[in-house]
Amino acid sequence: MLLASVCAAHAQPVPIIFDTDMGNDVDDALALAVLHALESRGEAKLLAVTLTKDNRYAAPYVDLVNTFYGRPDIPIGVVKNGKTPEDSAMIRVPCERKRADGTPVYPRRLNDGSTAPDASTVLRRVLESQPDNSVTIVQVGFFTNMARLLDTDRDLIARKVRLLVVMAGAFPTGIAEYNVKTDLPASRKVFAEWPTPIVASGLEIGNSILYPAVSIERDYRYVENHPIVDAYRAYKKMPYDRQTWDLTAVLYAVRPDRGYFSLSPPGQISTDEKGRTHFTESPGGKHRYLIVNDTQRVRVLEALVQLASQPPK
């Protein structure tokens, strides 16, 4: 029933809010590139990007990526008192790059995330502007922003959000995955109280599909300076293949009907006091997790490489 209802809604571009801990891993940057490619293809509409990494460069990096892809006006919201304020070269280096004349290599509006509005404010404003039961939220960072929204706007979520897709947990029996355990009270709250369906792309999905370094080295040469390539190179010494955790969540959110993934039976995801996820099958449950086989992995990787490296429209 969940998959059928999701597919029926996809005749029009999927309205997406992207909630990310941009800066903690380079898969967030690649996932944002995939979203821009899907919007250029008329498959998605990126309504806003909200951040759960509390670092001054996170919002400026998102802003310069959005500007690079020709969408400088996408609203950006930042977490206040977030869990990971640490420095991150993958977002700082592209933000600090200058040309010989001192101008930024990557133009943007924001120079410091502290000047961006609070994520909760952005989420509330964007959701209120959308039709009922229309928005898909793709959360690929911590659960902080969604838990805070639940505290004040549960009814708004129930009216406006059609689906929450999270990159979180490990299934069917979970370890304490990073996105879950970093803000554990928020994770437990969202899995227990979120009023709409949830689909999880678990740790095992991205672990089994690696984005190839050869794509970074060859497929982005259509421009001299590319903010995704800069982030990838700054994150870790090249060459390296990186897990596609966040990219798989984005791909399912926009293309749930392409057969890239299978779905678990319906049930309930819960999180214990150590951050381990557990899934209890239940016919009336609102939660599912992604499953992928060897044939699907080949198709997923091909799609992700093509989308992530697609030039701006």
Image (tube, rainbow, N blue to C red):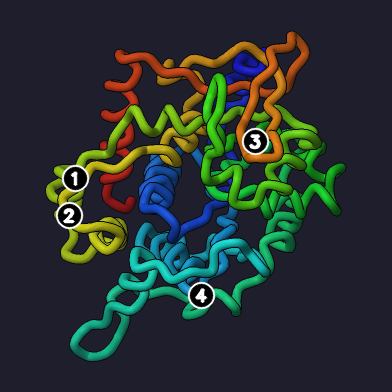
* Secondary structure at numbered mark 4: loop
Q: Amino acid at mark 1?
A: Ala
Q: Nearer the viewer, residue 129 or 287?
A: 287
Residue shown at 38%/47% (left/top)?
A: 27
Q: Residue furthest front?
A: 274
Residue 56's mark? Answer: 4
Q: Amino acid at mark 2?
A: Met
* Image spot of residue 16 (x, y percent): 58, 43
- Residue 40 appearing in the image: no
* Mark 3 or mark 2: whose residue is earlier in sequence: 3
Residue shown at 18%/60% (left/top)?
A: 223
Contact check, label 1 and label 2, Cβ < 8 Å: yes
* Secondary structure at numbered mark 2: loop
Contact check, label 3 and label 4, Cβ < 8 Å: no
Indicate the quadrant containing the N terminus: top left, top right, bottom left or bottom right. Answer: top right
* Mark 3 or mark 1: whose residue is earlier in sequence: 3
Q: Is residue 35 above or below residue 304?
A: below
Query: Label 4 to label 2, Cα distance in Å?
Result: 25 Å
Q: Is residue 14 above or below residue 258?
A: below
